Image (cartoon, helix red, strand yellow):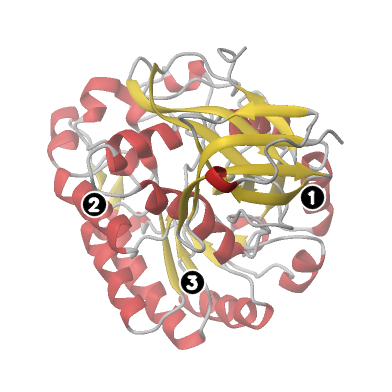
Amino acid sequence: MASLMIRNIRLINPIGKTDEIVDILISDGKITAIDIHAKSTIREIQADIVINGKGFIAAPGLVDVHVHFRDPGFTYKEDIHTGALAAARGGFTSVVMMANTKPVIDSVETLEYVLDKGREEKINIYSVGNVTKGLKGEELTDFSSLKAAGAVGLSDDGIPILNEDLLERAFIKAAELKLPVSLHEEDPKYIENNGINRGYTSKQLNIGGSDRRAEISMVERDIKLALNTGVALDIQHISTKEAVELVRQAKRAGGNVHAEATPHHFTLTEEAVLTYGTLAKMNPPLRTEEDRMAIIEGLKDGTIDMIATDHAPHSKEEKEKPVTQAPSGIIGLETSLALGMTALVDKGYLTVSDLIDRMSTGPAMLYGLDAGDIRMGKRADIVIFDPEEEWIVGDFLSKSENSPFVNWRLKGKVKYTVCGGEIVYKDENIG
């Protein structure tokens, strides 16, 4: 494997609160030296590949614990290879795939299928297993077997688990196995035509929409169960100010409770549906400006400890259906870092270190992944980006293009993604 030297780069590593100009040497896939640039003793080493990092930031490779790569069953939308390419372009070196495929990942056989395909790619690809068989919410899967086969967590993402007794048993077993459980929190009894917030926008469209109580009621229930069982609970794609506050109080009570925010939920509000149509339709839906700011405040104070894209590819034909028929979800891997830089860092809500913590270190810690840190001897998973470069969102490496951010001008451009010491993505504008 070629050796790699990154010279004169600003290293930001949330672990240790590192923020300084350094030289980094990578050999045999690992970080073998980090020297402060002004005192560097390694700068003259003749590495096979040399990157001039002046003006760029090096940070731990990004980690997304909530992606849909649609294999098996829906590979016309995305597959594991194209998903991996999109992830690398976005600066991600590790991703966790969700299990609402076809067939679903409720068996060791299907789990091994997706993990085997993931190993063919140049980034680290993990998967959760389902909490319940067939996503039916009636019978638990074999958690022990799924963990032994490589599942890093459990989720029925896409479908809420309504049976409280069943979920409590799931939490107890998952806590014993030290597996995090990630939950999609939407009670269907409060929803008529999901994907659009019940409020101003649903009235404009004359559809029922999704009431905020759909999320709040389930988050409240599941946090109580988590506090009683000690499970590591991940509230997925949080969307309401009330749910953010419930997570905040649970953390203060000592609960092992965590939450994800998506870039679209900290960037857009429900009015985006009136501008972008079904490209801004997702579950849970975009909500109000007050909710958006509560999510940003949650990211700022650590209540929300992860940014996850919920990368959800759909075909152009599917998204062109009427709003009540089109599927929910947008792609997000190739725009996530830039949206964080533009909407959070550039506006003064988060530091770059805070952003990297939410996009790398925090997710890696919850899921127990060997990621989220840059230190000597560690696997060399690094994102290198220009924090000042502006670019226009246009083409995608994903199979799908269902994004409301097309033609947006964003700040922060990934220049290189290094995974296991290998350059797996390089900006086409670099010579």
User: Of the residues shown, which amino acid type is indicated by label 2?
Assistant: Asp
Give the residue pinned by disc 3: 163
Quadrant occupied by the C terminus: top right
The quarter holding residue 416 reads top right
Chain-order first, disc 1 or disc 2:
1
Residue 99 shows up from this direction: no
Picture mark count:
3
Residue 58 shows up from this direction: yes
Q: Is residue 90 left or right of residue 140?
A: left
Give the residue pinned by disc 1: 110
Q: For the residue labelled by badge 1, is the local secondary structure a helix, a strand or a loop?
A: helix
User: Of the residues shown, which amino acid type is indicated by label 3?
Assistant: Asn
Locate residue 157, reporting x and y percent: 53, 53
Mark 3 Cα-neighbour bin, 10 Å: few <14, some 14–19, many ≥20:
few
Residue 211 disc label: 2
Locate residue 146, reporting x and y percent: 76, 64
Q: CA distance from mark 1 to mark 2?
A: 35 Å
Residue under the image location 87 percent in, 36 percent down: 1
User: Of the residues shown, which amino acid type is indicated by label 1?
Assistant: Thr
Q: Nearer the viewer, mark 2 or mark 3?
A: 2
The quarter holding residue 323 reads top left
Residue under the image location 83 percent in, 36 percent down: 120
- Contact, mark 3 vs mark 1 (Cβ under 8 Å): no
Locate residue 283, reporting x and y percent: 39, 44
Locate residue 371, reporting x and y percent: 64, 55
Chain-order first, disc 3 or disc 1:
1
Q: Nearer the viewer, mark 3 or mark 1?
A: 1
Mark 2 Cα-neighbour bin, 10 Å: few <14, some 14–19, many ≥20:
many
Chain-order first, disc 2 or disc 3:
3
